[in-house]
Amino acid sequence: MSRKGLRCLAVLSLLGSLFAMPLVAADLSGAEAKLAAQAQAFSAAWAKDDAKGLAAMFTEKGTLINPFGRLAAGRAAIEMLFHDEHTTFMAGTRFDVKIARVDWVTPDVAVVLWDVIVRGVTGPDGKKSDLPHQVTVVDHRVGGQWLAEAARPVAYLPAPAPPGKM
């Protein structure tokens, strides 16, 4: 192939990739809107103390570790965990959620970071308090619907004092 032909091919390849990039971004922004809708649907099911509805947002083999370290593997176990919580210390609480970040593994798999405050958690002393934390959710698009493969909440501890400042 001539030099002119190679240049033409390079320019066409570059133009093709530039036109394809917005299509990929548009697809992902639509997916991000669906992930945000999923987070709000989770919050709505939480407000109803709907253990079955909360568990339905996970894949059949999904896993959840709650902020207190309890592991639930599989949708039935996740439903039982939510049932146990929402008939006791989480009953009547509110789940305020905002998506902080979405990292794409593939167009059908995303790692989503939720900023969360569970409001009105009943403590062992009977007093209500809020539980601010983050949840890392691995979401998987299955048949056009986003479902959680795994969810890992974490409540951060305050940093220790620097040496010599204790």
Image (cartoon, rainbow, N blue to C red):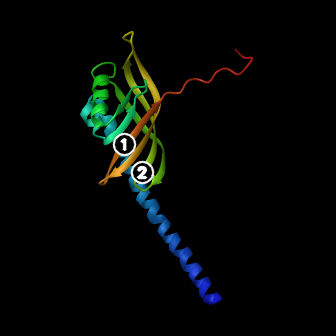
Q: Is residue 103 above or below residue 79?
A: below
Identify the image quadrant of residue 54. Answer: top left
* Quadrant assignment for the N terminus: bottom right
Q: Label 1 sits on what residue type?
A: Ala
The x, y position of residue 132, in whole percent, is 46, 27
The residues tagged by marks 1 and 2 sit, at their Cα atoms, a distance apart of 10 Å
Residue drawn at x 58%, y 79% as measured from the top left: 11
SS class of the residue under badge 2? strand
Within 10 Å of disc 1 (Cα), the crowding (few <14, some 14-19, many 20+) is many
Of mark 1 and mark 2, the one earlier in the sequence is: 2
Task: Tell me the quarter of the image containing the C terminus.
Answer: top right
Q: How many marks?
A: 2
Q: Is residue 91 visible?
A: no
The front one of 5 and 33 is 5
| Element on which disc 1 rests | strand
Residue 148: which disc? 1
x and y percentages locating residue 94 in the rendered image: 35, 28
Residue 27: image x %, image y %? 41, 60
Q: Is residue 106 visible?
A: yes
**Closer to the camera in the image, 46 or 150:** 150
Measuring 36% from the left and 11% from the top, which residue is drawn there? 126
The residue that disc 2 covers is 109
Amino acid type of the residue tagged 2 in the rendering: Val
